[in-house]
């Protein structure tokens, strides 16, 4: 008896999609935006006890946008996070949303924006995605730099703050043109960004770096089947050493301080008093 | 998440985050409004179905996800935090008490007719046991179903039935043999629109206001024999008791969510509110009071988790379940009362959520078997 190998499990040959795209999306672990942040008395750090953590909301929007692009074009979304073992939670979240694979750069020491961009550069060179999607900033230190550094290091084009007010979720809105589109030839990406008095549309050669703004989309929930499937999706572990990146920070956080406490407001009985106070006390009118 | 250590796995916690996001985004913002209107949109059933929440423990053959009861436990805990006991009760009744007996005891045909559309959110279900003259004493029910050809003729009434007004079907406890005591009980599925079945008042309640709670009347109501749950007469009592375990656990789990929510609220409140030149949290008496509440909460939680662990492990843990139901729901009432007290005058105002927790919590030791009945069950289990 000779065993004839079966080449394909599925009886149908998979259909070709418009164009497979490979998208790398970042998934940083940040403090839950709902939690109250307190600074340690010596200003060296924030108080971390009892804090909850989440995926950076801008990154979650990135994952969502990546998934939508892949649903349309075929291809895969790979998520990447840098940090200790605990960042696997954010990677699993992105996998549960639907990302196919994850890359975890295991690093627990200090890291500045250039360090992050340097590590991502190496991951990009390894993965060779068509598109890297990052949040425009992470909500913990609000730097708004990594995407820009990364594009510079890679020598790629970049489109920052991808956004579109209309892309919020009603059925009608969903059918409108999304803010992020890969061209039919698969060689370019079109990105809508919000500017002061309206919208600007950019076209950028692929591969490219795109950063997301808050109003790009509403991320899906991680569904139960998604959560189950995420269990068996692969997370590849890398380290700065393996990637050959020196991450010694060039920028150091010197001190943290809380904003001054706001004084309680007052209620005024009528408009006349309000105008009087604005004119004579606040001196703004 | 150490409190669920050895019970919940990472995937359960991931599911918890999803449910919490749904609760925060889709329920909480409207909870006050629904409570005030004494109704929540029916679309929530279809929305929950779409999210897969109505069929977590049911087989895929009926549209469920077969994820298991622990996932439903997570859902129940998180629903307890939505700010409206009524919403949690209305949705909860669908996947705990109304469909539970159908899944466990229904015939294949009954599951296709009622369970599957309930999991899809197309049909709303209710469980009808309590009557004006018999609640705790289930064997003393008076609603009768007399066999006549291929129909049962149902006569009697039910009250306090959750989802009663909009239910498309009611799993109804009836006496098919009034002389036989508990052995004369059966469950019959009665569909809305069956001649002789009418819905009375929508009842006004202290709490759980967004859920619809109704009186149901049956007057020579003809129900096909095919609607006899499981197809065998006289099995009603064990069928009711069988599902009581999960109903009682679900009430305990909901109380856990509610307690957790209240503790978070009160921690923020005492840190913010100032009196006598300092935050309330500066007073040792306040700190200790909250510490005691947190301790009582943890004790209730671990007892509930113990019962849950036994239950999902396949044990018929009737004493532990009754203990958990009694302790969790009573602790919830006490914590609600203490948190209300710590709010001062604000606690008495409708614009603060704590009053709603206080009202909603009060149902816990009454519904699904009263605390006294739980105590009686525990005593019996002790052989007394
Ligand atoms: C908001 C709400 C929703 C509900 N939803 C449903 C529903 O969906 N379906 C349904 O079938 N029912 C429902 N119920 C009814 C609920 O299950 C009953 O109210 C409960 O079981 C108590 O029965 P009862 O009201 O007849 O009280 P009773 O049985 O009259 O009890 C009155 C008091 O006597 C005590 N008592 C009774 N017997 C004993 C005893 N042997 N020893 C010591 N003390 C005893 C009780 O503990 C209680 O304190 C609901 C009730 C409420 C309030
Ligand atoms: C229906 C209603 C009618 C009212 N009518 C009037 C009225 O006609 N006129 C009027 O002037 N007021 C009125 N009040 C206000 C009422 O007197 C106050 O609500 C009450 O004195 C509590 O003050 P507070 O609400 O500021 O609570 P808080 O002072 O904020 O107290 C919050 C909690 O902290 C505790 N606490 C505060 N200080 C300490 C401490 N040192 N040690 C330990 N625990 C402490 C309190 O006991 C309470 O549990 C009314 C209130 C209500 C609800």
Image: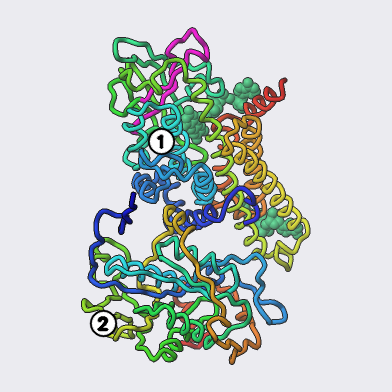
* Tag 2 subunit: A
| Residue named by callout 1 | B163
Residue B44 at x, y percent in the picture = 37, 47
Residue B4 at x, y percent in the picture = 62, 51
Give the class, few, some or many, for how many residues have Cα within 10 Å of label 1's Cα (few <14, many ≥20). Answer: many
Q: Quadrant of residue A49?
A: bottom right
Residue B179 on the magenta span: yes
Residue B164 at x, y percent in the picture = 40, 32
* B341 left or right, relative to A280: right
Residue B138 on the magenta span: no
| Residue named by callout 2 | A187
* A14 left or right, relative to A48: left
Q: Is residue A51 above or below residue B29?
A: below
Ligand 1: does it lie within 8 Å of the C-beta at label 1? yes
Residue B56 at x, y percent in the picture = 44, 44
Question: Which stretch is magenta?
Answer: B168-189
Foreground: disc 1 or disc 2? 2
Residue occupying image coordinates x 46% and y 75%: A26
Q: Is residue B81 above or below residue A106?
A: above
Question: Disc 1 versus disc 2: distance between alpha carbons?
Answer: 56 Å
Residue furthest right in the image: B284
């Amino acid at each position: 008896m000779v065993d004839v190998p079966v080449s394909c499990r599925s009886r149908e040959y998979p259909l070709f999609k418009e164009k497979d795209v490979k998208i790398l999306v970042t998934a940083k672990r940040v403090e839950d935006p709902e939690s109250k942040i307190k600074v340690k008395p010596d200003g060296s750090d924030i108080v971390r006890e009892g804090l909850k953590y989440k995926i950076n909301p801008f990154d979650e929007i990135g994952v969502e946008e990546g998934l939508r692009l892949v649903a349309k074009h075929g291809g895969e979304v790979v998520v990447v996070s840098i940090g200790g073992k605990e960042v696997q939670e954010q990677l699993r979240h992105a996998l549960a949303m639907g990302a196919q694979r994850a890359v975890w750069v295991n690093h627990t020491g200090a890291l500045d924006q250039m360090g992050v961009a340097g590590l991502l550069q190496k991951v990009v060179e390894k993965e060779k995605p068509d598109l890297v999607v990052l949040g425009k900033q992470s909500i913990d230190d609000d730097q708004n730099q990594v995407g820009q550094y990364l594009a510079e290091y890679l020598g790629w084009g970049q489109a920052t703050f991808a956004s579109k007010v209309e892309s919020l979720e009603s059925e009608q809105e969903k059918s409108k043109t999304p803010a992020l589109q890969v061209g039919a030839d698969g060689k370019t990406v079109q990105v809508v960004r919000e500017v002061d008095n309206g919208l600007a549309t950019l076209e950028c050669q692929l591969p490219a770096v795109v950063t997301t703004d808050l109003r790009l989309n509403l991320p899906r929930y991680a569904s139960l089947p998604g959560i189950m499937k995420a269990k068996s999706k692969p997370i590849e572990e890398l380290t700065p050493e393996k990637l050959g990146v020196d991450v010694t920070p060039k920028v150091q956080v010197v001190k943290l301080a809380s904003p001054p406490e706001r004084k309680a407001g007052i209620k005024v009985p009528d408009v006349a008093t309000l105008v009087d106070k604005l004119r004579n006390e606040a001196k703004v009118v | 998440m150490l409190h669920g250590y050895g019970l919940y796995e990472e995937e359960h916690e991931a599911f918890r985050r999803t449910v919490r996001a749904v609760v925060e985004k889709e329920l909480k913002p409207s909870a006050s409004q629904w409570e005030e209107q004494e109704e929540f949109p029916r679309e929530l059933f279809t929305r929950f179905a779409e999210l897969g929440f109505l069929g977590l423990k049911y087989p895929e053959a009926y549209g469920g996800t077969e994820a298991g009861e622990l996932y439903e436990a997570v859902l129940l805990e998180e629903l307890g935090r939505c700010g409206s006991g009524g919403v949690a009760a209305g949705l909860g009744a669908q996947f705990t008490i109304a469909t539970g007996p159908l899944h466990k005891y229904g015939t294949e045909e009954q599951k296709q007719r009622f369970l599957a559309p309930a999991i899809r959110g197309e049909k709303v279900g209710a469980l009808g046991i309590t009557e004006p003259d018999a609640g705790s004493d289930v064997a003393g029910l008076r609603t009768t179903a007399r066999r006549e050809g291929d129909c049962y003729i149902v006569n009697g009434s039910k009250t306090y039935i959750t989802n009663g007004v909009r239910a498309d079907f009611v799993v109804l406890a009836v006496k098919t043999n009034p002389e036989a005591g508990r052995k004369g009980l059966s469950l019959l599925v009665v569909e809305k629109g069956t001649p002789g079945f009418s819905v009375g008042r929508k009842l006004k309640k202290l709490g759980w206001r967004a859920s619809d709670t109704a009186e149901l009347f049956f007057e020579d109501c003809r129900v096909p024999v095919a609607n006899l749950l499981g197809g065998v007469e006289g099995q009603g009592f064990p069928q009711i008791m069988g599902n009581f375990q999960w109903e009682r656990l679900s009430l305990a789990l909901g109380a856990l969510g509610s307690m957790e929510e209240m503790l978070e609220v009160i921690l923020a409140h005492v840190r913010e509110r100032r009196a006598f030149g300092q935050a309330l949290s500066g007073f040792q008496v306040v700190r200790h009071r909250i510490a005691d509440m947190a301790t009582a909460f943890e004790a209730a939680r671990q007892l509930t988790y113990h019962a849950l662990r036994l239950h999902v492990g396949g044990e018929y843990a009737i004493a532990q379940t009754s203990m958990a139901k009694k302790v969790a729901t009573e602790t919830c009432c006490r914590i609600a009362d203490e948190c209300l007290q710590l709010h001062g005058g604000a606690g008495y105002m409708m614009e603060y959520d704590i009053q709603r927790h206080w009202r909603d919590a009060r149902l816990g030791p009454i519904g699904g078997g009263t605390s006294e009945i739980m105590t009686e069950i525990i005593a019996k289990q002790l052989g007394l």
